[in-house]
Image (spheres, rainbow, N blue to C red):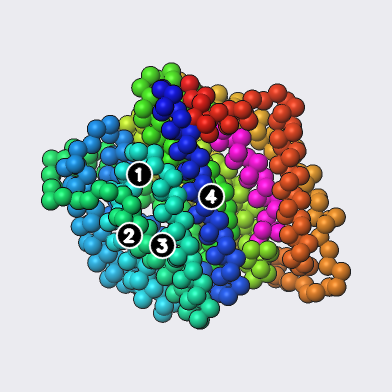
Amino acid sequence: MSESLKKKTGTALIWSFIDKGGQQVIQVLAVYILARILLPEDFGVVAYLALFSAIANMLQESGFSSALIRKQNVSEAEYNTVFYFNVSISFVVYILFYFGVPWGINTFAKAPDPILTDLSRFIFISFIFNAFAIVQNIHLQKKLAFRKNTQITVIAGCIAAAVAIYMAKMGYGAWSLAAQLVMQSFVRTVLLWVFIKWKPALQFSWTHLKSMLPYSSKLLFSGILGQVSTNIFSLIIGDRFSIHQAGIYSKANQFNMIPQSVITDGIKSVAYPILSTVEEEERQGRVFRKIIRITAFIAFPVAAMMIVMAKPIILILLTHKFAESIPILQILSIGGVAYPFFVLVGVLMQRLGKSGQLMKVETTKNALLLLSALVSVRFGVLGIVWGITIVQFLSFFWGYYTVEKQFPYKLKEVLSDIVPYIAISIVAFVPVYFLERVIVFDPVHLFTITIPSVLSLPVNVTSYMVLLVVQSISGIGLYLLITKMLGSKILDDCIGFFKGKGLN
């Protein structure tokens, strides 16, 4: 790999992390404000509809984005064909969902909320906006232009968050959250058309579409299954228990996914284009091994932080209204650590052209999740969450086992590379957990939160803020110290990777 490509890759990776991190910072700040205005039920209504929106977005994207990113030389005719096909499909899907989803909710839901029909039809507008920017997104990724992508994302996120906060203060409830989703899509699409110079021409070729169909159709199916596995539980919890519980679960799941998605999306968005440029199998193995080790070095301590600091995170950011989310967040964080590795397995399969194999792995994961839901639902929300956690690990092991036969980096090598970071994370963060007994106090006995059958927590926001800061600094500091004392070079690898070096 040339030095210029290494440097470009390192810069792209840094901006990719800034992009994903910036999105999450904006999201957290918006949630911090919105949680003080809205109720868990408001978040629950939007979470209830998340599965339909995710499936619709996958249908209109149709898997062709990945096909074009993977392809070395893409013609203008291919870009135009994908653009017109995706836009056409988005309108067809919107019409189907406009009538079909409300009918399904009113027919099968035990106690459908009257707002769901109108809210769903409004939220679904977002994937029409998304369709108009798919090719622009492809250009950004192929050029590793993550700096520009970051700027667009931050601007769109800020505008959407501001609209949501204003509407929430005006008393619009769940509509403010729906407006945030739609506004985010609309502003981002407008900015992509302004800053990305590509514009569609009057070209369309069924031949180009058919040539990409075998790969993209399999990827589409596996992508839909992935969205089902991600979003179906809010639907199940909302229908089986209550919209309130769906809101509680959705917030815990959101905070679980924030750090892991920053790690995963940041590395994935660079890993796939880079692996696509490396042809030699042995070098692919070395590059992928370095990605796995860097992911483990970051992901495991982050998961440990989320488990240890779930209480201050929830109480500070979401207030006592969401205190029931604390144990859910802790359990999800255990399984969430497997998520980045499972996604990287998918990246590897895509690079190897094994979209059919990826579809089988996603199908297996989806089947296991549905099975776990059927078995664990009798044990309540926490039972469902434990089922999700177990399936996360099983899916990663099964996915990598199926692909290791075609790749020089074997599963036992993966485990030997990541186990040390698990052990160091446990050693570093277990002592940090007990700092709560020293730092958290409530000298004036402001008030006590009582969550039936869950928690009884004294709340002093200042104390929990201090706890969060001290736990973070102590845990991270101890983790880095132990890693350095053991002679690990992973920190140097991370720095080199960010600079575009050490990819061989």
Q: Position of residue 228 (x, y in %)?
A: 41, 54
Q: Nearer the viewer, residue 105 or 215?
A: 215
Mark 1 surroundings: few (<14), some (14-19) or many (≥20) residues within 10 A = some
Amino acid type at circle 1 is Leu
Q: Main secondary structure of the magenta part?
A: helix
In the image, which disc is placed on residue 184?
A: 3
Judge whether residue 306 is colored magenta: yes
Please give left or right for residue 41 compared with residue 214 in the image.
Answer: right
Lower position in the chain sequence, tag 4 or tag 3:
4
Residue that label 2 marks: 190
Residue pictured at 24% horizontal, 53% vertical: 86
**Marks 1/3: CA–CA distance:** 18 Å
Residue that label 4 marks: 21
- Label 1, secondary structure: give it: helix
In the image, which disc is placed on residue 140?
A: 1
Q: Position of residue 450 (x, y in %)?
A: 73, 72
Q: Nearer the viewer, residue 353 or 438?
A: 438
**Marks 4/3: CA–CA distance:** 16 Å
Lower position in the chain sequence, tag 2 or tag 4:
4
Q: Nearer the viewer, residue 379 or 431?
A: 431
**Marks 1/2: CA–CA distance:** 15 Å
Please give left or right for residue 442 compared with residue 242 in the image.
Answer: right
Tag 1 near tag 3, CB within 8 Å: no
